[in-house]
Image (tube, coloured by chain):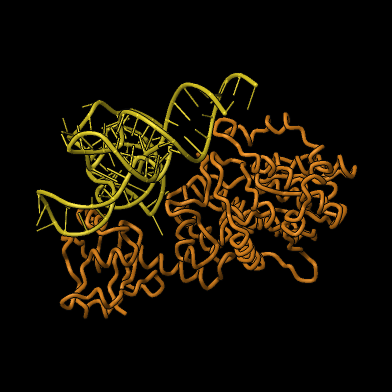
Chain colours: A orange, B yellow
Amino acid sequence: MENVFDLLKARGLVAQATNEDAIRELLAKEKVTFYIGFDATADSLHVGHFLQMVVMKHLQDAGHRPIALLGTGTTMVGDPTGKTDMRKMLTVEQIDHNALCFQQQMSKFIDFSDGKALMLRNGDWLRNLNYIEFLRNVGVHFSVNKMLAAECFKSRMEKGLSFLEFNYMLMQSYDFLHLNQNFDCKMQFGGNDQWANIIGGVELVRKVTGNEVFGLTFTLLTTKDGRKMGKTEGGAVWLDPNKTSPYDFFQYWRNIDDQDVTNCLKLLTSIPLEEIDAIDVTSGAAINAAKERLAFELTKTVHSEEDAQKALDTARQLFSGAADHEHMPSTQLDPQLVQDGAVAILDILVSAQLAASKGEGRRLVQQGGIVLDGEKVTDPLLTVSAEKLQQGVVIRKGKKIYQKITLA
RNA sequence: GGGAGUGUUCCCGAGCGGUCAAAGGGGGCAGACUGUAAAUCUGUUGCCGUACGGCUACGGUGGUUCGAACCCACCCGCUCCCA
């Protein structure tokens, strides 16, 4: 049987590991319990989390037992890694709510039945820690000098780092210790930015229990020029269909950089490597086909095959100029906007969220960025009759943002 | 606790007491070119108004002034030096 470690490696998922050979061996000889932590900083998972779940899934499929650790405790502190400023403190209610959202979304990807995977919350053990006790049992094992030298605090040494956040590493390390002692957890995985936190845990476990445990980080999902992937102007690309519609999700991948396509296919999809290697990305047409495949596969996994098909159909129709717009994003206008039997174009743009303000809408029109039912709008004062709206009109903003507008 | 700085529009950052909705860069948006890509070039980028204009903004609160992002006082946040 193929070793999962080799599979992860071949797909380019592995970034750093504490002891490659030992990890490889361990994964080959026994069913290993491992964990990945997720801090509940938002009410939906995003693309970055998705990568983590892909890894989790690979390992689960290979017979290992994942622990998805919801950071209901660590989120109270806030990970300073990679942040230039302290992040906003979340309330307990927000954190618990976010964790619940995570929990529901994760169940879609990972099989938690019959103990095949566990979902735990570190708030269960972190929130009630006794300060003095914790300092004596865990704090002793950490060297401040060493911590300060860690790469992840570098940017914070200039901007400032609060004691609260400084403790984050201890919290996460303690998690590993707790999981090792109570669930026989032997490995921790995480994004490459988590390296320092992970080693902290590995060392703590060794110092306290003498057990050798392992850490492994995987590649961060970044574009070729190093930017974090899954971020757009409007924020993150969410997995929650209410926050990022399946169509937008599809389009995000459909519009990805040429140079990132192969990498994304390897990292995020479950298409076999041989098949990916065979995908032609040398011509414009072939690259577009590959992007379409990528977008379809991911939408299918994250949402459903039906959603993926709809998004694909809609996109094909829109971009080939056909008029069918069954599945495109739509907006129902408030009837109160009707004045003298018509609605002003600027009001339509604002209510459909195609423009943030009327001023922006006016600019768009003046610059020729708005097309109504195939006709370029040139007059910002244009109105659209109520009858026409009742039938439904299609507005295009820029090259690829479409919206169907109807009157409620 | 003492001292020195600093806080500007999405971000960085410039900003003589009036001519500042505020230079410049980044980012965003749009146009051209393209392959629903990248790069490049152009325009644009507080809100309302077709426009003259009005309104809201320069950490907070007061004050000086005909007039304040710019001056003063106090407060808050952050950085650095000393303790």
Evaluate whether residue A370 shows in this view: yes
Evaluate whether residue A274 shows in this view: no
Q: Quadrant of the N terminus of chain A?
A: bottom right
Image quadrant in which you'd find residue A155: top right
The answer to whether A394 is drawn above or below residue A223 in the figure is: below
A389 relative to A107 in the view: left or right: left
Residue A118 x/y as whole percent: 76, 63
Residue drawn where x is 53% and y is 40% of the image: A226
Foreground: A240 or B60?
B60
Residue A87 x/y as whole percent: 55, 47
A374 relative to A46 in the view: left or right: left
Image quadrant in which you'd find residue A350: bottom left
Foreground: A28 or A98?
A98
A312 relative to A6 in the view: left or right: left
Foreground: A167 or A178?
A167
Residue A26 x/y as whole percent: 85, 49
The answer to whether A56 is drawn above or below residue A145 in the figure is: below
Image quadrant in which you'd find residue A18: top right
Q: Quadrant of the C terminus of chain A?
A: bottom left
Numbered-mark total: 0
Kindly give the residue lying farthest to the right in the view shown.
Answer: A210
Residue drawn where x is 69% and y is 42% of the image: A167
Residue A158 x/y as whole percent: 56, 30
Residue drawn where x is 26% and y is 76% of the image: A336
The answer to whether B24 is drawn above or below residue A123 in the figure is: above
Residue drawn where x is 78% and y is 50% of the image: A130
Foreground: A404 or B77?
B77
